[in-house]
Amino acid sequence: MIATSITQTDAKENAVRIALVAAVQALVLLMFPAVLSAQQQLVSDPEIYEKDHFRTECKVAAFGDDFVTRLDINNDGLMDAVVNHGVLDCDGEKGRACDDEGCPYNFYVQVKEGGYLMIATARIYGYDFIKRFGNMVFVLKMHPRYCERTDKEPCLMTVRVRGTKFVTISRK
């Protein structure tokens, strides 16, 4: 017979269940800070961070002139960074992470406490950074499926960065 409530089980079975629940809760509590720190990792300089990463991934890594672009993407007066993996030459293969949906770009904002926080990664064809209604915004050129289309024209997604969040303004 299977017990349907805790009152129908014996003390030994209850002790095992309580020990298992306590062990799982302890494991979750121990893992939670590690997850938080992984999501909130500050880097001192995105260019150094990304180049060091690719120097370990590739035997020979060469970086194009547009590998890192520094600009204020969230209108806070601090210089942020956009990293374009499409201009990376890894072991003689340029843009090997690129595909028919574009190339990976990483977006970093500089924080007042010091360092940079990566706030987004996007697979795009490219972008324009323009002023619209007094604020600087990105017009991301993306695969048409991101605008829920099946034609060949790129999706043009206009986004503004507020603090550390991308806010979509429009999609065409």
Image (cartoon, grey):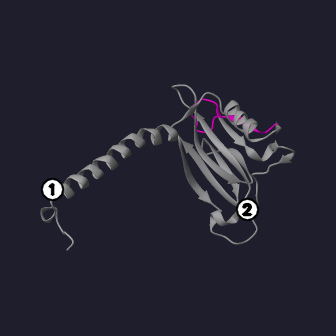
Looking at this view, name the residue that lies furthest to the right.
Answer: 92
Indicate which disc residue 154 carries: 2
Report the residue marked by disc 1.
11
User: How many residues crowd around disc 1 within 10 Å: few (fewer than 14), some, or many (20 or more)?
Assistant: few
Name the N-terminal-most of marks 2 and 1. Answer: 1
User: Which corner quadrant of the image does residue 72 belong to?
Assistant: top right
Horizontal and vertical percent position of residue 50: 69, 36
Picture residue at 42% right of the left edge, 42% below the top: 31
**Residue closest to the eye, 35 or 166:** 35
Horizontal and vertical percent position of residue 113: 51, 25
C-alpha gap between disc 2 and disc 1? 65 Å
Q: Any magenta on residue 78? A: yes
Residue type (three-letter) at the residue carrying disc 1: Ala
**Residue closest to the eye, 155 or 27:** 27
The quarter in which the C terminus is drawn is bottom right
Front label number (2 vs 1): 1
Residue type (three-letter) at the residue carrying disc 2: Pro
Residue 11 visible (yes or no) = yes
Q: Secondary structure at mark 2?
A: loop
Chain part drawn in magenta: 65-80
